[in-house]
Image (spheres, rainbow, N blue to C red):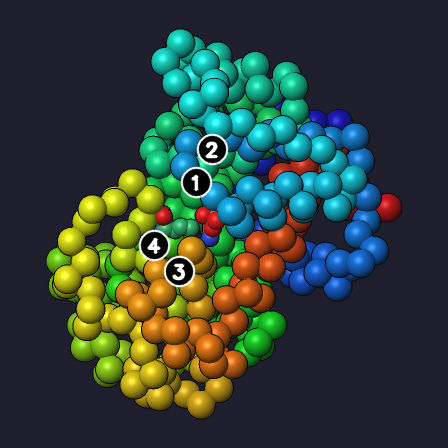
Amino acid sequence: MTDATPRHFLDLSEIPADTLKQILNHAHQLKRLKFSPPQIFEGLSLAMVFDKRSTRTRMSFEAAMKQLGGHTIVMNTQEMQITGAESVEDTANVVSRFVDAVMIRMGDHEALCEFAQHAKIPVINGLTDHSHPCQIMADLMTIEEKLGALGGKKIVWYGDFNNVAYTFAQAAPVWGFELLVSCPEDLRPLNAAYEPDAQKAAEGADVIVTDTWVSMGQEGKDIDKFWPYQVNTALMTRAKPHAIFMHCMPIHRGEEVTDEVLATPASVIYDEAENRLHAQKAILAWCLEHAGVKLSR
Ligand code: CP
Ligand code: NVA
């Protein structure tokens, strides 16, 4: 029934473009079935392991698994033997005997990959310092819902070129949208187009997107260089009239984005957050399908 190699969802760069598009299409389908969710995960369990804070990732994965008939176990790495007494290899092997998939949020992307290398079940990246692929699947789903096909859209990223921005840049060639990054010169990305002038970057944008200037683990960082990249009303008016504002949340209101922008209909942040639920159902289904789960019942 199963292939020896589990399907991991660690980084968009490791998954074929057609597969990513299929997962996204399935996410839209599952959203349409929001009030009659197919019980495709009946009898299956997902473990969630966190070494960083979370609201959306924790709750949306738990809801996704349970709404489709499955179960969850949540652990903090501080409560686990992995924080000093046990190797990643042993932990990955043991977790693989208890549950059917594991979602992990940890800073160290290499450690996540090491875990996946030893795991006999699918491992899903719930955010590392390198990337946040589940977030971007939800973001792309939101853009498709609000603006239609992604191909040819102009998406402008402001502020810190961080894990979320990096993942957006990975997605651009897959779906054929233009990603322009407007950030301080020292953060200039290698995998996306760059425009240091924030106002100029916004011209003709379909989507304006930003994230906190202080990611988890960077507390105390100097944020002065980011002020020219704050998303505010002046900047939004340069974008197309139908342009939307996105943010993966949590938001530091008054820093990377003003309250004024968040109060406009252009802000789609809560739809974006909800879409974590639907996108992750589809990601889990793709991972678990390979382990014998039937996608339709
Ligand atoms: N966007 C996101 O991943 O939120 P949490 O940190 O609350 O999970
Ligand atoms: N860039 C942020 C995203 C939080 C969801 C962080 O890593 O903290």
Question: In the rendering, which numbered label is found on residue 53?
Answer: 1
**Mark 1 near ligand 1 (CB under 8 Å)?**
yes
- CA distance separating discs 1 and 3: 14 Å
Name the spot of residue 69 as percent of width and height, x first.
78, 40
Secondary structure beneath dot 2 equals strand
Name the spot of residue 274 as percent of width and height, x first.
60, 59
**Mark 3 near ligand 1 (CB under 8 Å)?**
no
- CA distance separating discs 4 and 2: 21 Å
Between disc 1 and disc 3, whose residue precedes? Answer: 1
- CA distance separating discs 1 and 2: 7 Å
Q: Quadrant of residue 74?
A: top right
- For label 2, the residue is 50
- CA distance separating discs 4 and 3: 18 Å
- Could you tell me which residue is drawn at 67 percent across and 62 percent down? 28
Amino acid type, label 2? Phe
Q: Residue furthest right?
A: 297
